[in-house]
């Protein structure tokens, strides 16, 4: 059995990733504020290893304690390979700078950037003695490389995540059992995040009509199909460690 620690499993891409892995009898440790009870049921049916941790990732000072509990829960499992998937993310607050609430900006960066940075640090610390394959997948966005008015924090947090990927891959390249780390943009996927984007005003997000048109023309990807394409990449040599890729180009 392989073990996958996945953030943001209550909906969208994270839920699909967890469901796909549990269906294949892989071990899943899930983290989100809301519990996805369907995952519990699936794990029971399939007799797969599953633990859920109800946790708000913006509480970044408590993340080392969370990872300590997670690795304790894995003590008797001895996974063959282990992965951390930083999938949880928020696009909010959406709007032009000068009109956003300061606290919401802080929560955004804690959730999208600081939490992944701390989780990666703890993952590398806890897995250092393990002579097995180790992999980190950071779910990024095309917005990390293309500026959008109204998404300044989202573009910046995802760009920061990609730079973590690049820098940490260099550090790991000299390790005997290195942690592979990649960033992946999933494309435009029909999830609650896209619903939030479509519900904004043009004043908050001038490009909203493009996303409404894509939805009306059935151009959004299905999260289950996206999860099915992502999973084989986690322990593969391609794309190379330290790189950003768009799933649509792989
Ligand atoms: N959908 C797209 O078109 C698209 C495109 C590019 C990139 N992405 C990226 O894909 C990832 C998944 O997004 P999605 O589209 O699947 O969106 P989603 O359905 O809104 O899912 C977001 C997940 O993140 C979790 N989350 C958010 N804030 C959290 C917090 N403070 N603490 C713990 N968990 C938190 C949510 O769980 P709780 O609310 O239960 O905590 C939820 O499970 C994100 O990183 C997003 O930026 C999505």
Image (cartoon, rainbow, N blue to C red):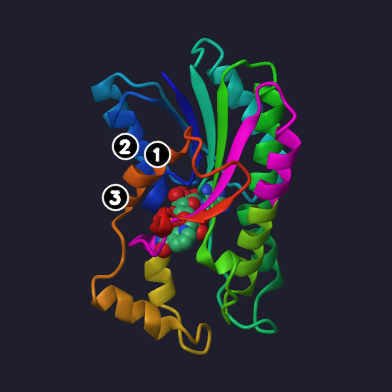
Where is residue 242 shown, x and y percent of the image?
A: 63, 45
Q: Residue furthest bottom?
A: 203
Up the image or down, 61 lies above or below 114; here it is above
SS for callout 2? helix
Up the image or down, 177 lies above or below 9; here it is above
For mark 1, what is the residue?
A: 231
Tell whether 216 sits left or right of 4: left
Q: Is residue 241 magenta?
A: no
2 or 1: tag closer to the N-terminus: 2
Q: Is residue 173 magenta?
A: yes
For mark 2, what is the residue?
A: 20
- Residue at 59% x, 18% y: name it: 72
Mark 3 or 2: in front is 3
Up the image or down, 101 lies above or below 31; here it is below
3 or 2: tag closer to the N-terminus: 2
3 or 1: tag closer to the N-terminus: 3
Where is residue 39 shown, x and y percent of the image?
A: 33, 35
- CA gap, disc 3 and disc 1: 10 Å
Categorize mark 2 by other alpha carbons within 10 Å: few (<14), some (14-19), many (20+).
Answer: some
Q: Residue furthest top?
A: 76
SS for callout 3? helix
Q: Image quadrant for the N terminus?
A: top left
For mark 3, what is the residue?
A: 225
- Residue at 53% x, 26% y: name it: 82
- CA gap, disc 3 and disc 2: 10 Å
Tags 2 and 1 touching, CB below 8 Å = yes
Tags 3 and 1 touching, CB below 8 Å = no
Magenta segment: 164-192
Tags 3 and 2 touching, CB below 8 Å = no
Label placed on residue 148: none
- CA gap, disc 2 and disc 1: 9 Å
Quarter residue 117 falls in: top right
């Amino acid at each position: 059995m392989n073990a996958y620690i996945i953030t943001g499993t209550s909906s969208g891409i994270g839920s699909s990733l967890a469901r796909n892995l549990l269906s294949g009898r892989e071990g899943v440790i899930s983290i989100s504020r809301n519990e996805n009870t369907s995952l519990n049921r699936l794990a029971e049916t399939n007799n797969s290893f599953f633990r859920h941790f109800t946790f708000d990732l913006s509480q970044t000072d408590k993340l080392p304690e969370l990872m300590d509990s997670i690795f304790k829960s894995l003590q008797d499992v001895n996974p063959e390979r282990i992965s951390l998937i930083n999938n949880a993310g928020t696009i909010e607050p959406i709007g032009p700078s000068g009109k956003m609430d300061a606290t919401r900006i802080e929560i955004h960066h804690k959730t999208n950037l600081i939490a992944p940075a701390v989780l990666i640090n703890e993952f590398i610390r806890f897995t250092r003695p393990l002579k097995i394959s180790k992999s980190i997948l950071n779910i990024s966005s095309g917005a990390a490389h293309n500026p959008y008015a109204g998404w300044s924090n989202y573009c910046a947090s995802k760009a920061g995540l990609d730079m973590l990927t690049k820098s940490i891959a260099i550090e790991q390249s000299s390790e005997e059992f290195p942690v592979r780390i990649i960033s992946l943009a999933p494309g435009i996927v029909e999830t609650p995040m896209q619903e939030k984007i479509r519900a904004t005003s043009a004043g908050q997000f001038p490009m909203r009509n493009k996303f409404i048109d894509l939805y009306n023309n059935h151009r959004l990807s299905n999260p289950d199909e996206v999860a099915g394409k992502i999973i084989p990449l986690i322990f593969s040599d391609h794309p190379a460690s330290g790189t950003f890729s768009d799933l649509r180009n792989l």
